[in-house]
Image (cartoon, rainbow, N blue to C red):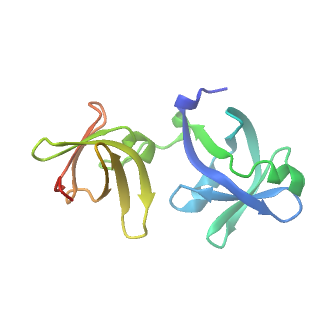
Amino acid sequence: MESAEELIVLGEISGIYGVAGWVRVYSYTDPRENILGYPVWRVQARDRWTALELQNGRRQGKAVVAQLQGCEDRDQARGLIGCKIAVPRAELPQPGEGEYYWADLQGLRVYNRDGTEFGTVTRLMETGANDVLVVSGERERLIPMVPDVYVLEVDLDAGVMEVDWDPDF
């Protein structure tokens, strides 16, 4: 099985759906149903990743529902609630120019144009209008992920991001 470092988390199991072992999935992909394009999911339960074949799945309202190999009833499905869903990085398509996977942005050191270090990207949030970088340093900052406006440069090789953001904000 792949190590956790080689896996990219694409969602999590958020609930049960029906009585036949189907689960509700909160997908981080865009669009949400893109998670169904991966035939084998790595599901994390108790700090261990297990490969489970995706048997069936579909978009259901704003959510995604799926049926996984070996999950045949509500009790088995209930045991998966809260589990992360990942796939090997090698299975992901290459991002386009100026596009990034959230996992690649996490951990970048963030500086403003004047060279003031704000800290590191600890996570990203979806807000509807724009994704938001959560940057933790001497204090937490929320910076909209808007290229060429607030995010000026991303250098994945160097592990840094330059932003146009007031240090007092």
Residue 146: x percent and y percent? 28, 59
Front residue of 3 and 87: 3
Front residue of 35 and 107: 107
Quadrant for the N terminus in the image: top right
Residue 103: x percent and y percent? 45, 42
Task: Identify the residue shown where x is 57% and y is 48%.
Answer: 10
Furthest-left residue in this view? 114
Q: Is residue 146 above or below residue 7?
A: below
Task: Identify the residue shown where x is 35% and y is 53%.
Answer: 133
Q: Is residue 93 left or right of residue 138?
A: right
Q: Please identify the quarter of the rendering in which residue 62 is found.
A: bottom right
Q: Please identify the quarter of the rendering in which residue 166 is found.
A: bottom left
Residue 75: x percent and y percent? 88, 53
Task: Identify the residue shown where x is 43% and y is 69%.
Answer: 128
Front residue of 38 and 155: 155
Q: Is residue 152 left or right of residue 80?
A: left
